[in-house]
């Protein structure tokens, strides 16, 4: 006779869909959506997302390959 399986749900982590839309600062654990409160610095070559809390660059993209912020 097979043993019944129990299912549990771990609410400690956001669903995978939400994790994909949120950036995490590796330095201070600040997190925010990509369109959130990150400081954005754009040069002729790159777009940088910088943590507003500690100044760590959390995302660096070539402007040629980056989507405009806020695009849906």
Image: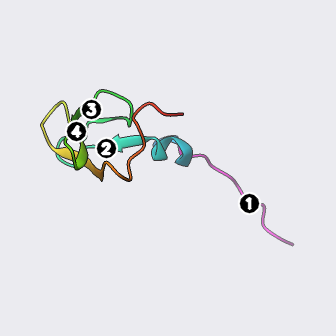
Callout 3: helix, strand or loop?
Answer: loop
Image mark for residue 42 = 4
Sequence-wise first label, 2 or 1: 1
User: Residue at the spot x=24%, y=34% of the render?
Assistant: 40
The question of residue 59 being in magenta is answered with no
**Relative height, residue 35 to residue 15 (above, below):** above
Q: Residues within 10 Å of mark 4 (few under 14, many from 20)?
A: some
Q: Residue furthest front?
A: 44
Sequence-wise first label, 2 or 3: 2
Give the distance between the C-alpha atoms of the residues marked 2 and 1, in whole angstroms: 35 Å
Q: Quadrant of residue 29?
A: top left
Give the distance between the C-alpha atoms of the residues marked 4 and 3, in whole angstroms: 12 Å
Residue linked to disc 2: 24
Quadrant, the N terminus: bottom right
Residues rendered magenta in the picture: 1-10
Residue linked to disc 1: 5
Image mark for residue 38 = 3
Q: Nearer the viewer, mark 1 or mark 4?
A: 4
Callout 1: helix, strand or loop?
Answer: loop
Find residue 51 and report its horizontal and vertical position in percent: 20, 36
Sequence-wise first label, 1 or 4: 1
């Amino acid at each position: 006779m097979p043993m019944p399986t129990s299912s549990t749900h771990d609410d400690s982590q956001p669903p995978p869909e939400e994790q994909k839309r949120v950036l995490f600062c590796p330095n201070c654990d600040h997190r925010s959506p990509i369109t959130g409160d990150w400081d954005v610095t754009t040069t002729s070559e790159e777009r940088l997302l910088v943590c507003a809390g500690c100044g760590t660059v959390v995302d660096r993209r070539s402007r040629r390959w980056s989507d405009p912020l806020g695009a849906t």
